[in-house]
Amino acid sequence: AQKITQTQPGMFVQEKEAVTLDCTYDTSDPSYGLFWYKQPSSGEMIFLIYQGSYDQQNATEGRYSLNFQKARKSANLVISASQLGDSAMYFCAMREGQTGGFKTIFGAGTRLFVKA
Amino acid sequence: EAQVTQNPRYLITVTGKKLTVTCSQNMNHEYMSWYRQDPGLGLRQIYYSMNVEVTDKGDVPEGYKVSRKEKRNFPLILESPSPNQTSLYFCASSTTTGTGSTDTQYFGPGTRLTVL
């Protein structure tokens, strides 16, 4: 069965430093997509970054990059130069392809605290 | 402006009283989803739709119905709500089915439902 694991319930990082949020996944589908979302305390879900399973290069979006290690089934989010506004809940998600029926599953999330 | 709208944003109802939460997107997206978010459980997919008249069950479909008669709308129907359906509900739409080289998933603002 498909599965997403985020092993860090909470993380602290100093402002302006980089932080890595871990995500591992499990699937037998050769085609899948990986997503990261941010949920601030206000509650909205904000899309951050996406990586397709066939992409050779790691995805980047501004200060966000996705460290995609396919053999290890890991899709860690790297936030560079952390800002106070980055304090939020972060979710990793996976959507399988045709074999998995295009369902989407989410990890339990990691709460990030950025210290001034 | 690209957006996903949900109505109502807040709803308190009683057990057994049928209700519908509407969802609409203005981006001509094919893939739409409903999720529920509960403390400690992350987001779980209820139903999703790959296109008009095509819907599939997610991980927690019991007690819910959906329809996709038009591309832009994907309402969530609770025929006989029960207290265990008290939750925060999100509608989302994606540019693709989410296994290609690019994708973005937009979320609605959420609907907080309380069933007494």
Image (tube, rainbow, N blue to C red):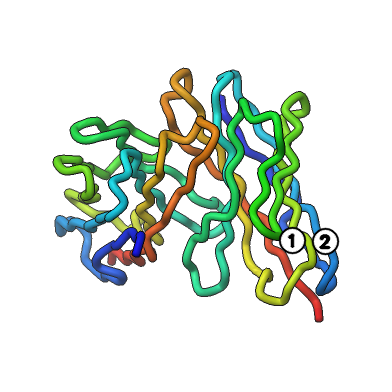
User: In the rendering, at what x and y percent does residue A72 appear?
Assistant: 77, 28
Residue type for callout 1: Gly
Residue type for callout 2: Ala
Which residue in the structure is indicated by mark 1? Answer: A10
Left or right, residue B53 beside residue B47: left
Q: How many marks?
A: 2
User: Is residue A51 or residue A25 the one in the foreground?
Assistant: A51
Mark 1 or mark 2, which is nearer the start of the sequence?
A: 1
Q: Residue furthest bottom?
A: A116
State the separation of the CA atoms marked 2 and 1.
Answer: 15 Å
**Residue B9, labelled with which disc?**
none
Left or right, residue B50 beside residue B36: left
**Residue A18, labelled with which disc?**
2
Left or right, residue A34 beside residue B105: right
User: Is residue B9 or residue A37 the one in the foreground?
Assistant: A37
User: Is residue B81 or residue A92 the one in the foreground?
Assistant: A92
- Identify the image quadrant of residue B86: bottom left
User: In the rendering, at what x and y percent does residue A50 appear?
Assistant: 58, 43
